[in-house]
Image (cartoon, rainbow, N blue to C red):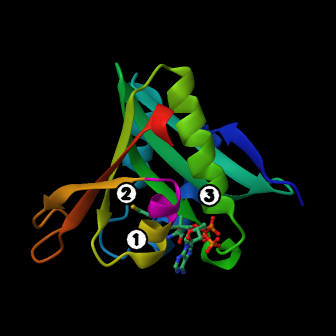
Amino acid sequence: MEPTIKKMTMNDVTRIVEIETASFETTAWSKETFVKELTGNKFAHYYTVSLDDNIVGYFGMWIVEDHAQITTIAVDRDYRGRKLGAFLLEYAITLAASHHVDVVSLEVKIDNEPAIRLYESFGFNYGGIRKDYYGPGKDANVMWVKVNER
Ligand SMILES: CC(C)(COP(=O)(O)OP(=O)(O)OC[C@H]1O[C@@H](n2cnc3c(N)ncnc32)[C@H](O)[C@@H]1OP(=O)(O)O)[C@@H](O)C(=O)NCCC(=O)NCCS
C-alpha cells in the first residue's frame, strides 16, 4: 500500500480530530482550531497522508518568510512504526524548501521519545527548553533544522 499525501480539506477535519484526540492527551486541538487554520490562516499548510483512501496521519506547518514552524504532526496509533511519520516530515521539509525556507522548527514535549528520535533522525538540533509550554510541569524542547544542511 503506497501512502498518498494530499492537502487537508474541511471534509477531513472530523477524521483528523479523531487522530488528534487519540494522539495528544491534554493538548489536542479542537475541530474549531483546525477549521480556523484551514480557512483563516494564510501562513498555514496542512496535509494528510492516506492508505487506501483512509486518512492515517497529517501535519501542519506555518511558513512565514524564511522560517517554517511545524504546528502538529501525528499518525494514527494503529499505523505507527511504518515510516509514515518520516514520510510526512520529509514532505513538510521539502515543501518548506520549495518556499525558500531557511529553518524549520517545532516544539516537542521533553519526554516524547518517539517524536524526538524522529526529529533527530532528520538532523534537528536542540534550541532550548520552553518551560511549562504544555501546562504546569510540562516543558517543551525547541528543535530546529536548517533546510539546506540536512
Ligand atoms: C511521532 C509520530 C508522528 C511518529 O510517527 P510514526 O509513523 O510512528 O514514525 P515512523 O515509523 O516514521 O518512525 C520514524 C523514526 O522515528 C523514530 N521513532 C518512531 N517511533 C518511535 C518509538 N516508538 N520509539 C523510538 N523512536 C521512534 C525512529 O527514529 C524511527 O526510525 P526507525 O524506524 O528507523 O527507528 C507518532 O509516534 C505519533 O503520531 N505520535 C503522537 C503524536 C505526537 O507526539 N506528535 C509529535 C508532536 S511534537
Does 19 lie within the magenta span?
Answer: no
Q: Is mark 3 within 8 Å of ligand 1?
A: yes
Q: Earlier in the sequence, mark 3 or mark 1?
A: 1
Q: Give the percent coordinates (x, y) of residue 54.
A: 77, 58
Q: Nearest the camera: 49 or 145? A: 145
Mark 1 C-beta to ligand 1 under 8 Å: yes
Q: Residue furthest right?
A: 1
Which is more foreground, mark 3 or mark 2? 3
x 61%, y 46%: residue: 90
Which secondary structure type mostly characterizes the magenta part of the structure? helix
Name the residue that disc number 2 marks: 29
- Residue 86's disc is 3
What amino acid is labelled 3 in the image? Ala
CB of mark 2 near ligand 1 (< 8 Å): no
- Say what amino acid the circle numbered 1 marks: Phe
Q: Is residue 147 above or below residue 21?
A: above
Quadrant location of ligand 1? bottom right
Picture coordinates of residue 131 (x, y %)? 10, 65
Q: Is residue 72 above or below residue 10?
A: below
Q: Quick check: marks 2 and 1 in contact, CB under 8 Å?
A: yes
**Boundaries of the magenta span:** 118-123
